Image (cartoon, coloured by chain):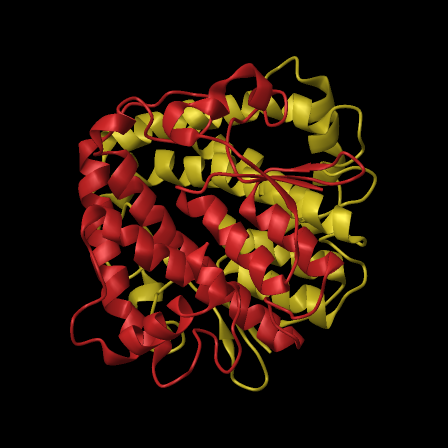
Chain colours: A yellow, B red
Amino acid sequence: MKFYDCSTAPSPRRVRIFIAEKGLEINTIEIDLRNGEQMAPAFRSINPNCTVPVLVLDDGTRLTSTAGIRGYLEAAHPEPNLTGGTAAEKGRIADLQWRIEMEGMMAMSEALRNSAARMQGRALTGVVDYEQIPALAERGRARVERFLNGVEAMIGDKPFAAGDHYSVADIDLLVVVDFAGWIKMDLPEGASNARRWHTAVSGRPSAKL
Amino acid sequence: MKFYDCSTAPSPRRVRIFIAEKGLEINTIEIDLRNGEQMAPAFRSINPNCTVPVLVLDDGTRLTSTAGIRGYLEAAHPEPNLTGGTAAEKGRIADLQWRIEMEGMMAMSEALRNSAARMQGRALTGVVDYEQIPALAERGRARVERFLNGVEAMIGDKPFAAGDHYSVADIDLLVVVDFAGWIKMDLPEGASNARRWHTAVSGRPSAKL
């Protein structure tokens, strides 16, 4: 297997942490997104969509989304499970992960990619250049603020986002909260459960990746 | 179990078809989105996010996303599998489903919700009212057109989107293609594989739902 990664980007970090929490060692190749290496012919031949993360399996199968890569790894290496044990747990964790992705991750991407000077003409990842939409950046910021304000209730008095066990919901929530720092946003000062959770998950070795 | 549905909306259709393909019978309650029933106190007490689909499990667990509901049902009722058998299949199907959701479903939602007169002030689902962004509607249309043009290559000579077996990728692709009709977009005329696939999956009893 080969994992195409970018150490400075939030999306591949969601996979890096997942791999570390599984205790797997996968041959990793760094793609320099900041200098556009994802658009160069060499990488384009691996992923025509020009995005990371990518996982290439030994049989040549290429997985080009966080969902696909983590779905494969969870099935191939079930323990420790990161998406739940029972059916109800799997449902709850998928539900929570989805909410974190849509309301947190997507909103953050919209806020950043539609405003940052270095992302002009690159408001979406992929091969097509889309112009920035300032109103979408503004809406994204409002949604990120709302999302961060909601983390306190999401965590409550639980040790982890989905309950007693660390899961993909914690991975994605950590990545979103840290990503929000790029636009100088953070968990509210008084959000004690959210902050207790953030300190705990940030202390895991996987969070250093 | 109780399934909160809306027969006129594309998102719950992704779950309705999934339930039918599993051969399950679930007590279903219709929520009239066109008349705003999702915002009324009765439904708000079931899902504070004011969205459908919702699946309430017998233990009271409430799943409020397509991902969560289908993840639960797939784990609780594994056969026939709709998300793949082997780990590599699971990865490939999750990858494809993700692409269909992001590049097709999301783009369609952006195109419609940011332009339709009856969705003014309702550019996103949920409890917060967001104003329409005309540039996002325009970008959405461009992305839907690009997506529909890509279905021919996605299907190729395979019977189903992910290969030899019907899966969630077929469900979501069918829902997106039919949803595109709302803004008068369709598969290209000459897309013979895409059209052969669409005719076949539309002929399944589940597609009538």
Q: How many marks?
A: 0
A154 and A8: which is toward the camera: A154
Residue found 71% across the figure and 36% down from its top: A161
Q: Quick check: can you spot residue A171?
A: no
Q: Is residue B102 above or below residue A101?
A: below
A193 and B198: which is toward the camera: B198
Q: Is residue A177 above or below residue A126?
A: above
Horizontal arrangement in the rendering, residue B92 relative to residue A183 (left or right)? right
Residue found 56% across the figure and 38% down from its top: A99
Horizontal arrangement in the rendering, residue B202 relative to residue B75 (left or right)? left
Q: Is residue B52 above or below residue B89?
A: above
The N terminus of chain A: image quadrant: bottom right
Q: Quadrant of residue B122?
A: top left
Residue found 36% across the figure and 77% down from its top: B155
Residue found 51% across the figure and 17% down from its top: B40
Q: Quadrant of residue B32?
A: top left
A72 and A202: which is toward the camera: A72
Image location of residue A42, percent across then percent down: 34, 77
Image location of residue A115, percent across then percent down: 29, 34
Q: Quick check: can you spot residue B92?
A: yes
Q: Is residue B193 above or below residue B202?
A: below
Residue projecting furthest to the top: A190
Horizontal arrangement in the rendering, residue A112 relative to residue A66 (left or right)? left
Image location of residue A197, percent across then percent down: 73, 31
Image location of residue A162, percent across then percent down: 73, 39
